[in-house]
């Protein structure tokens, strides 16, 4: 089934327009090819558009920032602003002088460069939103199975152009390493870095032990730490922190590792077709990654920071997601199986016993199609995980 990007309205669209009426600058950040440009052109169709990856444009903006900005007296959409980060200081002077909201819409796919310049120059003047690839809600009623979605992932271009996902992710990853990473650091051994990222894919949904990962990749603990940070900055992976409340139990302190897009993780694992997904020993972890990322998208699409963590103690009792809200905790267990079995509820039951009155709701998100309201928990199909509205 083919989708057309132009007819898929992104969930964050209305909020983005609202923020542009409240702040002089709005920054849209997120992974490369997550749809930032399309979103900004859709929400602000009358604004001038400038792409800083064009060499001539980049050179002009860097060499003569005041002259460059004078071309756009009413502001503009500045795409991939991290290519000319010093421009942000000059934007500050203009928005302070003109005192108009919604002048500049900035986009960028490298969070580190942007955040340092933003914090220095535009603090209090900029709203920041994070756009990830499509969510289940944005794709709407579609016929893809869970296995197909784990293979295909959620990058808009794959749906818009009906691309082969394995090929598309191969090109995406090559471009990412050759352009984004080399922009951030002087990468001496690209093959070793690529192997490192593939080893990360083999650890999705697992505790992140940097010493073990570095040893297997043949790099120092310090290098492993730096490379993980780079993968986070460029929106490839994220870490889910452990639940921090003390229940007089021995709580695991390490974070868990996930990819922002499950399709990229599948590619890195060498999965080329749906039958391989079904047979892969990490199928359950891929499914878990897909759901965790979708719930995170729900937070970001409301312009909220992540409030997600996981619970695990030294005895192996575990809940995949704990969402901490002003009303209490929401516990979510993720299972790739298509049939509900009693064991699905074991972690939730244990957490309910120790969390007492802090727990306000429990969910099971599973690989089946039915939605069920059980006494032990709300049971949702993976396609409907966006119905977990409390978080």
Image (tube, rainbow, N blue to C red):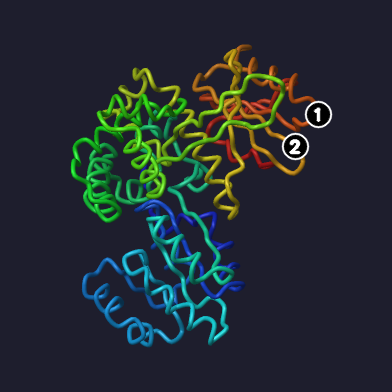
Residues packed near mark 2 inside 10 Å, few (<14), some (14 to 19) or many (20 plus):
some
> Looking at the image, which residue is at 54% across and 54% down?
11
Does residue 288 lie above or below 306 as drawn? above
Residues packed near mark 1 inside 10 Å, few (<14), some (14 to 19) or many (20 plus):
few
Quadrant housing residue 7: bottom left
> Looking at the image, which residue is at 22% across and 45% down?
174
- The label number, if any, that marks residue 328 in the structure image: 2
In the foreground, 111 or 5: 111
Label 2, label 1: how many angstroms apart (C-alpha)?
A: 8 Å
In the image, taking residue 211 as reference, residue 306 lies left or right, namely right
Say which element carries label 2.
strand
Does residue 97 lie above or below 151 as drawn? below
Does residue 59 lie above or below 79 as drawn? below
Residue 23, percent from left and from top: 58, 72
**Of marks 2 and 1, which one's residue comes earlier in the chain?**
2
Q: Quadrant of the N terminus?
A: top left
Residue 101, percent from left and from top: 57, 78
What residue is shown with label 1? 357
Q: Quadrant of the C terminus?
A: top right
Residue 335, percent from left and from top: 53, 22
In the image, taking residue 357 as reference, residue 390 lies left or right, namely left
Residue 72, percent from left and from top: 39, 84
- The label number, if any, that marks residue 164 in the structure image: none
> Looking at the image, which residue is at 77% across and 41% down?
327
Query: How many marks are shown on the rendered structure?
Result: 2
In the image, taking residue 81 as reference, residue 287 lies left or right, namely right
CB atoms of marks 2 and 1 within 8 Å: yes
Say which element carries label 1.
helix
């Amino acid at each position: 089934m083919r989708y057309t990007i132009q007819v898929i309205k992104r969930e964050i669209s209305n909020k983005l327009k609202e923020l542009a009426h409240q702040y002089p600058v709005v920054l849209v950040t997120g992974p490369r090819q997550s749809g930032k440009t399309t979103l900004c052109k859709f929400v602000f169709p009358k604004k001038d558009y400038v792409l800083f990856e064009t060499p001539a444009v980049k050179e002009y903006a860097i060499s003569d920032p005041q002259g460059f900005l004078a071309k756009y007296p009413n502001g503009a959409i500045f795409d991939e602003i991290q290519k000319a980060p010093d421009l942000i200081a000059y934007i500050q002077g203009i928005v302070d002088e003109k005192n108009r909201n919604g002048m500049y819409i900035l986009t960028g796919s490298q969070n580190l460069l942007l955040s340092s310049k933003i914090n220095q120059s535009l603090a209090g003047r900029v709203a920041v939103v994070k756009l990830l690839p499509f969510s289940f809600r944005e794709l709407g009623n579609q016929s893809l199975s869970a296995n197909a979605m784990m293979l295909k992932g959620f990058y808009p271009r794959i749906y818009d152009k009906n691309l082969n996902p394995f090929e598309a992710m191969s090109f995406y990853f090559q471009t990412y390493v050759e352009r984004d990473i080399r922009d951030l650091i002087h990468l001496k051994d690209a093959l070793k870095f690529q192997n490192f990222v593939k080893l990360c894919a083999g650890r999705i949904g697992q505790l992140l032990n940097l010493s073990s990962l570095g040893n297997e990749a043949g790099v120092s603990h310090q290098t492993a730490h730096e490379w993980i940070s780079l993968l986070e900055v460029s929106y490839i992976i994220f870490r889910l922190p452990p639940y921090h409340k003390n229940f007089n139990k021995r709580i695991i302190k390490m974070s868990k590792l996930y990819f922002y897009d499950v399709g990229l993780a599948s590619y890195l694992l060498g999965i080329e077709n749906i039958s391989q997904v079904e047979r892969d020993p990490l199928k359950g972890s891929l499914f878990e990654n897909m759901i965790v990322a979708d719930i995170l998208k729900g937070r970001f699409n409301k312009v909220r920071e992540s409030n997600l963590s996981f619970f695990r103690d030294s005895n192996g009792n575990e809940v995949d997601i704990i969402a901490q809200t002003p009303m209490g905790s929401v516990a979510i267990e993720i299972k790739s199986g298509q049939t509900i079995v009693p064991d699905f509820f074991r972690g939730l039951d244990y957490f309910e016993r120790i969390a007492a009155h802090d727990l306000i709701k429990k969910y099971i998100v599973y690989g089946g199609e039915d939605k069920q309201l059980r006494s032990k928990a709300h049971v949702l199909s993976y396609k409907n995980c966006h119905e977990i509205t409390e978080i």
